[in-house]
Image (cartoon, coloured by chain):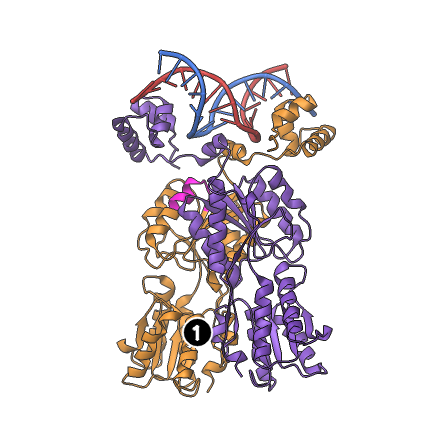
Chain colours: A purple, B orange, C red, D blue
DNA sequence: ATGAAAGCGCTAACAA
DNA sequence: TTGTTAGCGCTTTCAT
C-alpha cells in the first residue's frame, strides 16, 4: 500500500506553502510559471493525486450527476444513457446511475441515496408506479437541479425532455388508417405514465379524426413484457370484429406480436398491419420489417445532459423552461404496407 | 435555498455534543435509546441529511464503485450493468458508470477520472484497442480492488469474471458440423480481445477435431457493426468454396446476416446455417430463429458485483482467485436445423 | 508571488 | 453514556 501523498508533503518537499501548491496545481494566475512547473514536476514524481473527498467537502459539490431510470437493460434506455454519458463526461462530470426496477419504493430510496451522496443534479425517468412527487422535493428545496426525461411528471415546475407522444401516437394510428385499417387494436403500457397515456390520446384522436369510433375492446393496457404475449394473442383471436391493425407502444412487443401472429397463420401485413414504437434494432430484423416511430434516444440523452450542464454552469436557467420536445419520425416499413 | 443543517446545529439544539449526535445518527451502541430517539427526531424535524463529503473525507472511502465498459448501448452490456447495479445498490453502494467507446485513450482518461473521484473499486470490460495495463497500476499500487469482466486482460494478476469462450466457440462450431456443415465461415470481432480470439480458437479446434482443415479465407475479423454487413456479403458471394455454415461472434450481426442472406436468395438453414453468440432478444425474433450461445450477462454482472463487494467487506480475497468462469449454453434453433 | 490560518462536516481516540 | 479534540486534505481570504 503506497502511502498517499498530499499537498502538504509536496509543500515540504518544495519548501513552499500548501496554499502555493494548491494554487499551482489548479493553475492559479498568481503563481509564477517557474513555481508551477516545479510543483507539477514534484506532483508527477511522487504520484500525487488530488483527494476529491477534500475538494468536495470544501467546495460542496461533487461533479457528479445522478440518474434514475426504470431499468438499465432496455435498448432505448441504454441508448439514452450512452448519450448522457458522452456529453457529461466530456465536461468532467461523472454519472451515478441507478435503476428503480419500476418500483416507486426503490425510486424513493435511490433518490434519497443520490441526494445523500451529494450529486450536483438529478436526471430521472419515472417508474411505472410512481405517482407522487414527494421524494423529489428534497432536491428542489435544496436547489439541486432536477430534470425529467421520457417518463415525466405532469407538473408545471418540472423541467422535462421528451418527444410529443400524442402527435407520434396520432401519426402511427393515422398511418394504419391510411393503409386501410379500420379496426385497430392499441397495445399500451401503463396509462399512469405520460408516454403511454399520450400515445393513447393520439390514437383516439386519430380514430376520431377519421370517423372511426373508439372501441374499449380495442385497447389493451399491458406491461409490454414480450413474455406475456399470450394474453394479447387470445384477445386478438377472440375479438368479435376482426382486427386489421395493431399499434404497439414498444418495438420489442410489436416484434413478438408479429412473430406470434405469423406462427398462428396470420399474414402480416395482408391480414393485420402492425406498427411499433421506438425504432429499436429489432424493428429492422423482424420479418416483415416493422414500421415504427423513430424515437431519438441518444439525442434525448445528450440533450438532457447538455441542459443540466448548461444549467449548472449558469449558462441557461432551467426554471424558465418547462419542456424540450424532440423531433420524432414515422418510419414506414413492410409491416404496414398495402 | 434552505440552509443546510449540520450535526453541530443539532448538538446545539439538543444540548449534547456533536459526537453524541454523530453516534446517535449512526446507531452507535453506547448511546442510550432515549438520546437516540431525541436525535433522530430533531434530525428529521430540521431536515438534516448527512454530508457524505465529510464522511468520505474522514473515512477515505466513498461507497462508490467505478465501472468502465466499451459502450452502454449494447444489449449484453446493459444486461450486465443491470445485474451489477442490483447487487451493489442493495448493500448501499453506488455505481459510477463510464464508457470507453472502444478507445484506449478514453479508457485511460476514465480510469484516471474514476481513480480521482475516489471509487472504492473498479470494474472493467476492455475496449477493442486496449493493449496495455499501465492505466490500471495506479489502482493496484493503491490497493484499490480491480476486477475485469467479459473482455479481460490475459495477466495472472488480473481477477476476472467471464465465460469459457473457447469452449463456447468450440460447441457452436461443432454444432454446425454436426448439422452437416463442412465449409464454415467465422465472423469474429477484433482478435485483440480475449472473447473473440478464444472463440476463434474454439472454432479452429472444433474444425481440427472433426478433420476439417482451417481456411484463412473462412475467417473474417470485423468490428461486428451491423451497418458494415456489405463486406461480409461480398465475401460470402465471392468465396470459391460454397459456404454452408456461419459462426458469428454476435447475435446482432448474425441476425443482420440472416436478413441480408435471405434477401439475396439464400435459404437459411437449407443453404447456409447460422449460429450467433449471446442469446440476445433479437435471436428469438429473427426468422428463422437464431441458434446461439446463451451468455449469462445478468448473472455475470451480479457475480462481478458480489465478488467486489465481498472483497471490500473482507469476506473473500480476490487475490487468491484468478478467474470465475460462468456456465454458457448452446441454444439450438431453426437457423441451424437440418 | 507567496504564506498563514480558518473552515468545510464528520468520525474516533481518548477522557471523563 | 457522553464530551473534547484532533484530524481527514483541500481551498480561500487576508496578510505580507
Residue placed at 68% from the left, 82% from the top?
A: A237
The residue at 32%/47% (across/down) is B134
The x, y position of residue A148, in whole percent, is 57, 51
Task: Locate residue B127: give its quadrant.
Answer: bottom left
Residue A53, given in percent of the width and then of the height, sits at: 47, 35
Q: Quadrant of the N terminus of chain A?
A: top left
**Closer to the camera in the image, A108 or B62:** A108
* Chain name for mark 1: B
**Residue A223 makes an appearance in the image:** no
Q: Tell me where residue A10 sits by quadrant.
A: top left
Q: Is residue B57 left or right of residue B173?
A: right
Q: Left of A150 or right of it: where is B29?
A: right
Q: Is residue B247 one of those drawn in magenta?
A: no
The answer to whether A108 appears left or right of C7 in the picture is right
Above/below status of A242 relative to B120: below
SS at badge 1: loop
Residue labelled with disc 1: B276
Residue at the (29%, 31%) spot, across then down: A42
Residue B207: give x, y in percent of width and height. 34, 78
Give the x, y percent position of residue B117. Answer: 44, 40
Q: Is residue B113 magenta?
A: yes
Q: From what the image shows, is residue B199 above or below residue A108?
A: below
In the rendered structure, which segment of residues is drawn in magenta? Answer: B111-121
Amino acid at each position: 500500500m503506497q502511502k498517499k501523498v498530499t499537498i502538504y508533503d509536496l509543500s515540504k518537499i518544495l519548501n513552499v506553502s500548501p496554499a502555493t501548491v494548491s494554487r499551482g496545481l489548479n493553475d492559479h494566475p498568481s503563481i509564477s510559471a517557474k513555481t508551477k512547473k516545479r510543483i507539477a514536476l514534484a506532483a508527477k514524481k511522487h504520484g500525487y493525486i488530488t483527494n476529491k473527498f477534500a475538494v468536495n467537502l470544501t467546495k460542496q459539490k461533487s461533479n457528479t450527476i445522478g440518474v434514475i431510470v426504470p431499468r438499465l437493460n432496455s435498448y432505448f434506455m441504454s441508448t439514452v444513457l450512452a448519450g448522457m454519458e458522452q456529453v457529461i463526461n466530456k465536461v468532467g462530470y461523472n454519472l451515478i446511475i441507478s435503476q428503480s426496477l419500476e418500483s416507486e419504493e426503490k425510486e424513493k430510496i435511490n433518490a434519497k441515496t443520490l441526494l445523500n451522496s451529494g450529486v450536483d443534479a438529478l436526471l430521472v425517468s419515472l417508474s411505472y408506479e410512481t405517482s407522487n412527487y414527494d421524494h423529489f422535493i428534497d432536491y428542489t428545496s435544496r436547489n439541486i437541479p432536477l430534470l425529467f426525461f421520457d417518463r415525466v411528471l405532469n407538473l408545471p415546475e418540472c423541467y422535462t425532455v421528451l418527444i410529443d407522444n400524442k402527435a407520434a401516437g396520432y401519426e402511427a394510428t393515422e398511418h394504419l388508417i391510411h393503409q386501410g385499417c379500420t379496426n385497430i387494436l392499441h397495445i399500451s403500457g401503463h396509462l399512469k405514465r405520460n408516454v403511454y397515456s399520450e400515445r393513447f390520446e393520439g390514437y383516439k384522436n386519430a380514430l376520431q379524426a377519421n370517423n372511426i369510433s373508439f372501441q374499449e375492446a380495442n385497447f389493451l393496457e399491458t406491461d409490454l413484457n414480450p413474455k406475456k404475449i399470450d394474453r394479447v394473442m387470445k384477445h386478438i383471436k377472440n375479438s368479435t370484429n376482426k382486427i386489421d391493425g395493431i399499434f404497439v407502444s414498444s418495438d420489442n412487443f410489436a416484434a413478438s406480436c408479429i412473430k406470434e401472429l405469423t406462427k398462428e397463420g396470420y399474414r402480416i401485413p395482408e391480414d393485420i398491419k402492425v406498427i411499433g414504437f421506438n425504432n429499436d434494432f429489432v424493428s429492422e430484423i423482424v420479418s416483415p420489417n416493422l414500421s415504427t416511430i423513430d424515437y431519438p434516444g441518444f439525442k434525448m440523452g445528450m440533450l438532457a445532459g447538455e441542459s443540466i450542464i448548461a444549467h449548472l454552469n449558469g449558462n441557461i436557467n432551467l426554471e424558465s423552461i418547462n419542456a424540450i420536445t424532440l423531433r420524432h419520425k414515422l418510419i414506414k416499413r413492410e409491416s404496414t404496407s398495402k
